[in-house]
Image (cartoon, grey):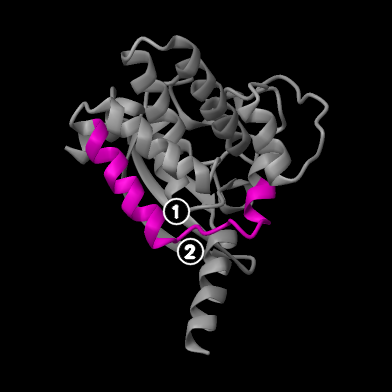
């Protein structure tokens, strides 16, 4: 059931055959002037209805903020509840859970994708379009970091879970992944299969930022 839910939300816009085409993804053409570039300021702008922001800046601002917690237990619990509600077609519960996730982490792609799908099913096109615009902006920000063809041009993620979100939004299922080291940084080498054609692809993601956070977190726990 969890797999069905993930497949269902991976539909905001496959850009074509082959991952080389991902770089043309979905980001807004430009960023508006903002009242600030900090995480809270950008989220406030989004919540005010202005989705014409620099989503790359938003992602980095979140990762630099005290809110950044890519391996939090509460986030895992809520994400599990989100997918369970969506798989059960309980959109009321799903949107409520998505809101809880976004309160802590407004750059959570799956929460926006499921909110988009559920609000559309509930007949609230305005809210659905709002969350779809944010999901597209976040996915486009990842696409803008590289082409995923090698470690040197890897897509940069700020949470390992973004790998699955990103690939599923393009119509790919993840089949395997392995951690590799290159030039002093850590990368996930992900094997994926295009759902419609069965075509295989290998995609690289730079995971140094979330793993560095985990290293520091584990070190503090030892102390």
Q: Which badge, 2 or 1, is on the more N-terminal residue?
A: 2
Asked whether disc 2 touches disc 1, contact meaning CB atoms under 8 Å apart, the reply is: yes
Give x and y (percent) for residue 85: 24, 35
73 is higher (above) or lower (below) than 24: below
Q: Name the residue: 54% across, 57% down.
A: 207
Task: Report, in whole angstroms, how far the alpha carbon at label 2 lies from the one at label 1.
Answer: 7 Å
Pick the residue in front: 68 or 170.
68
Q: Name the residue: 54% across, 60% down.
A: 210
Give x and y (percent) for residue 70: 49, 57
Tag 2: Cα neighbours inside 10 Å, few (<14), some, or many (≥20)? some
Magenta-colored span = 60-86
Q: Is residue 79 magenta?
A: yes
| Residue indicated by mark 2 | 180
Residue 88 found in image quarter: top left
| Residue indicated by mark 1 | 189
Tag 1: Cα neighbours inside 10 Å, few (<14), some, or many (≥20)? many
155 is higher (above) or lower (below) than 169: below
Residue 18 found in image quarter: top left
Q: Is residue 11 left or right of residue 211?
A: left
């Amino acid at each position: 059931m969890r797999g069905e839910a993930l497949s269902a939300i991976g539909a905001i816009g496959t850009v074509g055959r082959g991952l080389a085409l991902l770089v043309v993804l979905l980001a807004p053409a430009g960023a508006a002037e903002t009242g600030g570039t900090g995480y809270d300021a950008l989220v406030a702008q989004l919540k005010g209805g202005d989705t014409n922001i620099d989503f790359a800046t938003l992602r980095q601002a979140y990762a630099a903020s005290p809110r950044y917690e890519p391996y939090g237990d509460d986030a895992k619990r809520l994400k599990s509840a989100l997918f369970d509600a969506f798989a059960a077609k309980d959109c009321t519960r799903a949107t409520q859970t998505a809101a809880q996730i976004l309160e802590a982490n407004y750059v959570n792609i799956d929460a926006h994708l499921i909110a988009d799908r559920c609000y559309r099913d509930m007949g609230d096109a305005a809210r659905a379009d709002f969350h779809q615009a944010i999901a597209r902006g976040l996915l486009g920000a990842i696409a803008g970091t590289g082409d995923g063809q090698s470690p040197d041009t890897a897509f940069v993620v700020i949470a390992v879970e973004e790998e699955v979100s990103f690939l599923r939004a393009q119509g790919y299922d993840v089949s395997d992944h392995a951690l590799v080291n290159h030039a002093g940084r850590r990368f996930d080498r992900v094997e994926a299969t295009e759902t419609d054609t069965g075509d295989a692809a290998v995609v690289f993601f730079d995971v140094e930022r979330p793993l560095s956070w985990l290293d520091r977190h584990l070190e503090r726990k030892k102390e």
